[in-house]
């Protein structure tokens, strides 16, 4: 096995493109890197990365990424604060919950550049057993 140690990779025919075989795999420009997807489609690596996620069990945060803190506003109503803020409030989130109770609902919203809110309570106000939220896309500040 060989080890390659270097600081910069430069494409031979195009300085900003790395080719494996005859397929251009990665292209880069200022603050942007794309990777070859299916066919000739290019996918932005920065836009495709998960920017934040949290897994909570009732009021306790079990694990997270880019989540600095959690505020328990009321029964089943939590606000999470990001470690690294978003550049705008226009980002996308997906959430799910698991509960042994009936009538379970889920609200994710109040998006701000530094926080978001989740309210996974059922009709009696009881919090869900497990909650997961993923901030799928958006630009960090």
Image (cartoon, rainbow, N blue to C red):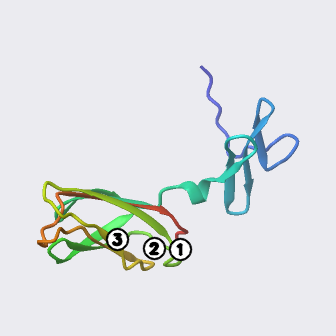
From the viewer's perspective, tell me whether residue 44 is left or right of residue 116. Answer: right
Q: Which mark is residue 85?
A: 2
Residue, x 32% and y 68% (percent of image)?
68
Q: Secondary structure at mark 3?
A: strand
Q: Position of residue 61 (x, y in %)?
A: 23, 61
Instruction: Calculate the distance from the C-alpha at mark 1 to the C-alpha at mark 3.
Output: 21 Å
Mark 3 vs mark 2, foreground winner is 3
Residue 108 pos. (x, y %): 34, 71
Q: Are marks 2 and 1 in contact (CB under 8 Å)?
A: yes
Q: Quadrant of residue 1?
A: top right
- Residue drawn 59% across and 58% down? 46
**Mark 1 or mark 3: which comes first in sequence?**
3
Q: Which mark is residue 141?
A: 1
Q: Position of residue 31 (x, y in %)?
A: 67, 63
| Mark sitting earlier along the chain (2/1) | 2
What residue would you read off at disc 3?
108
Q: Counting residues from the N terminus, which is met first, the one under dot 3 or under dot 2?
A: 2
Q: Is residue 89 visible?
A: yes
């Amino acid at each position: 096995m060989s080890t390659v140690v270097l600081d910069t990779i430069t494409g031979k025919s195009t300085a900003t493109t790395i080719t494996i075989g005859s397929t251009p795999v990665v292209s880069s420009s200022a603050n942007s890197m794309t990777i070859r997807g299916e066919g000739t489609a290019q996918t932005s690596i920065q836009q495709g990365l998960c920017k934040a996620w949290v897994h909570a069990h009732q009021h306790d945060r079990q694990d997270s990424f880019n989540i600095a803190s959690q505020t328990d506003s009321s029964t089943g109503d939590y606000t999470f604060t990001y470690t690294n803020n978003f550049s705008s409030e226009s980002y996308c989130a997906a959430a799910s919950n698991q509960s042994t109770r009936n009538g379970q609902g889920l609200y994710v919203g109040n998006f701000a550049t530094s926080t978001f809110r989740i309210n996974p309570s059922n009709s009696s106000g009881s919090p869900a057993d497990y909650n997961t939220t993923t901030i799928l896309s958006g630009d960090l500040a």
